[in-house]
Image (cartoon, coloured by chain):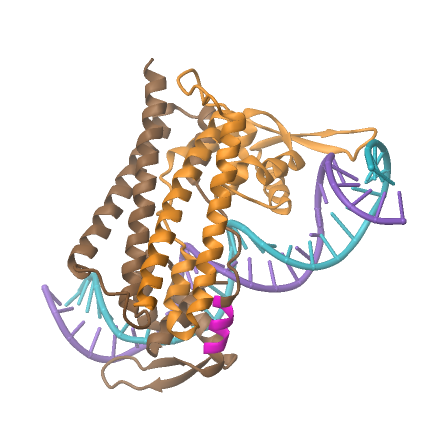
Chain colours: A orange, B brown, C purple, D cyan
Amino acid sequence: MSLRYAVLGLLVHEPMTGYEIARLFDASVGHFWSARHQQIYRELREMAGWGWLGDTAEPHADRPDARRYAITESGLSALAAWVDTPLPPHRPREPVLLKLLAAPAVPPDSLMAEFDRQLADVEARLAAYRDIVARHYDPPPPLATGPLNRHAVLYLSLTRGLSAALAYRDWLIETRDLLVGGAAT
Amino acid sequence: MSLRYAVLGLLVHEPMTGYEIARLFDASVGHFWSARHQQIYRELREMAGWGWLGDTAEPHADRPDARRYAITESGLSALAAWVDTPLPPHRPREPVLLKLLAAPAVPPDSLMAEFDRQLADVEARLAAYRDIVARHYDPPPPLATGPLNRHAVLYLSLTRGLSAALAYRDWLIETRDLLVGGAAT
DNA sequence: CCTTACATGTAACAAGTTACATGATTAG
DNA sequence: CTAATCATGTAACTTGTTACATGTAAGG
């Protein structure tokens, strides 16, 4: 569904090979969307078949040959049409709440261990985001001038990641205390 | 993956038919996990085949006959094993950021329309959550006493929904202002 | 020698969605 | 007459994951 447009969105900025796209997903873009290389190659071939992408074989002497994809006019209009289409309704997935539902069937420690893991995870994510911001986005990129470049979008994805992670961390702490306080008294 | 355990988690509280489970997903449980009836029936049959559930035919005079499922001992231990297993890593999906990536290829208004829709959506969700809390969870259910019942878990899912929605709303407003401010100057 | 980076793919499977089907009863 | 509620299902399809495959070149 959306992966296709994620790939198109990257190719708007510059032509790329599947491998380069996959590396971007592994790194920065992975902060707000992720995909395996198998799926990326599949989408690239499909979109090339529709004429949304043009591809050029790129022979290399030392490394394996690559296939570089560039977005076409029809790719650009498909992308614009997608942006203009309302996103599907928000569908929450909160697996930790699923574990709370199972609470009567499990030892309380098992549940608390998951809370601890989630807290450690979210703290690690917070630290990672802050580290990236400090390294690459201090001062923040100017969004005032001209169209958004990839760098600016990645900055916004970090602010979003921070906001979501902070909210999750606070909820985890509050809820854990509620549950543990309950067990204690 | 997790739907299976969502269903098991519901059946811990009381035996249910597929139809009843589907209605719960449509309503309250849908705040943190959702599923169509087709998938629910499929999982129920599968888990019954594994001996995780026992099922009883429930004939009705006036309505269609139903099949009521109850969790078994082996279902309970499968559920406990799942709770004890760390959840898979967090995989963010932020489709709005995907649209920002596509920005150079689309008219700015198209993007802003999506921001407006997202804002309207999240405000509606906030209002709905607050309404449910005011109606059914004032005062909040005591989490101090005994094991969590379904009611208490639904309350916690609402607090989580509120925290996530607030964070999203704030980010949307802040980011929209950054972008619009940029276009204006 | 072993691992990592480069670069692309096939095949099988798991999870989730959409469309379609059936058939009775009750409410408007 | 029409629609909604109850109750369960099949079939086709899309999306995403896991496992496996191939082959070169550079670095330790």
Q: Residue at x 61, y 27 (%)?
A: A15
Place residue A145 in its image quadrant. Answer: top left
Which residue occupies the foreground of this view, B52 or D16?
A: B52
Residue D26's x, y, as percent?
Answer: 83, 31
Of A98 and A150, the residue lying toward us: A98
Q: Going by the image, does A119 lie left or right of B185?
A: right
* Residue A10 picture location, percent across and down: 54, 31
Prevalent SS, magenta region:
helix
Can you give x and y, in whole percent of width and height, for residue B162 in the image? 28, 49
Picture coordinates of residue B12, whole percent (x, y) = 37, 75
Question: A115 or B76: nearer the eye?
Answer: A115
Q: Looking at the picture, tell me which residue is in the foreground, B76 or A73.
A: B76
Residue A15: in magenta span: no
Q: Is residue B38 left or right of residue B117?
A: right
Q: Is residue B82 located in the magenta-colored stretch of the structure? A: yes
Q: Toward which corner of the image does residue A47 lie, by quadrant?
A: top right
Q: Farthest residue in the front direction?
A: A185
Q: Is residue B12 visible?
A: yes
Q: Quadrant of the C terminus of chain B?
A: top left
Residue B35 seen in the current view: no
- Indicate whether B6 appears above or below B63: above
- Quarter of the rendering containing residue A68: top right
How many numbered callouts?
Answer: 0
- Left/right placement of residue A39 relative to residue B112 reads right
- The residue stretch that appears in magenta: B76-83
Q: Residue at x 28, y 55 (%)?
A: B158
